[in-house]
Amino acid sequence: MAEPTRRFARSVRFLQARLSPEGYLGLHLTVGLLVILAAGWWFADIAEDMSGNAATRLFDERVASWFHEHATPFLTQVMRVMTFFGSLGFVAASSSCVAIFLIVRKRWYQLIMVALAVGGGSLLNILLKHFFHRQRPVLENPLLTLTSYGFPSGHTMGSTLFYGVLAIFVAQSAGTWRWRVLAFWI
């Protein structure tokens, strides 16, 4: 029995290190990589459904048309306000304010996290838009006409990354698990 243990000792140590909650290359990195792989697989599945005449794309276009046809001035104003908080200008300005705050507090790792998540996500969004070439829905009398591609959504990606990073910061400083759950729920 000693022979196999010695033979695979390096592999066993590697697996133990990957599953250990101690150290920066342990369980946290392993779970993080698994989450990234799962999210990538999920995104690829969604992206595949957005091409051609896939049922998901046709459903997406019908939902957009339904909302456009049933718009009211009040709901339109509510949606404009909500959209503002995911807009490029707001996310960029808010990220800059957070970055300045982190520089003043000398929280370099958190600053790197904001820069990589929000800045890297913006670049990734631009690359993915040019990769997929999905045109925006064509609506009669649109509120706004944009010439850029529509998938993936820049508002969705930018706001998810920005508010996700803020939730991580709140969770790191929260005293109890309830506040941590609340931060991610919000």
Image: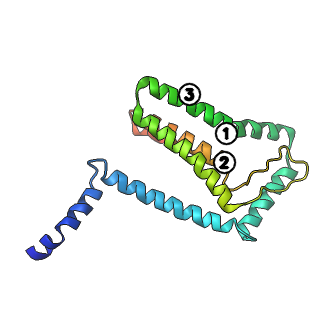
Q: Position of residue 71 (x, y in %)?
A: 85, 46
Give the alpha-carbon distance from disc 1 to disc 2, as whole Å: 8 Å
Q: Secondary structure at mark 3?
A: helix
Q: Position of residue 132 (x, y in %)?
A: 67, 62
Please determine whether, in this image, residue 96 is positioned above or below residue 88.
above
Residue kind at label 2, given as amino acid type: Gly
Q: What residue is drawn where x is 54% and y is 46%?
A: 120
Please determine whether, in this image, residue 95 is positioned above or below residue 134.
above
Q: Secondary structure at mark 1?
A: helix
The one nearer the camera, 2 or 114, is 114
Q: Position of residue 118 (x, y in %)?
A: 55, 42
Q: Is residue 185 shown to the viewer in this render?
A: no
Please determine whether, in this image, residue 26 is positioned above or below residue 179.
below
Q: In this figure, which colouring scheme has been used for the structure?
A: rainbow
Are there few (<14), some (14-19), or many (20+) residues within 10 Å of tag 1?
some
Q: Which residue is mark 2?
A: 154
Q: Which residue is mark 3?
A: 97
Give the alpha-carbon distance from disc 2 to disc 3, as whole Å: 20 Å
Q: Residue furthest right?
A: 141
Give the alpha-carbon distance from disc 1 to disc 3, as whole Å: 14 Å
Q: Which residue is mark 1?
A: 88
Q: Secondary structure at mark 2?
A: helix
Residue kind at label 3, given as amino acid type: Cys
User: Given contact means CB atoms under 8 Å apart, are the residues at marks 2 and 3 in contact?
Assistant: no
Are there few (<14), some (14-19), or many (20+) residues within 10 Å of tag 2?
many
Q: What residue is drawn where x is 51% and y is 39%?
A: 115
Tell me: 127 left or right of 82.
Answer: left
Looking at the rendered image, the quarter that the C terminus falls into is top right
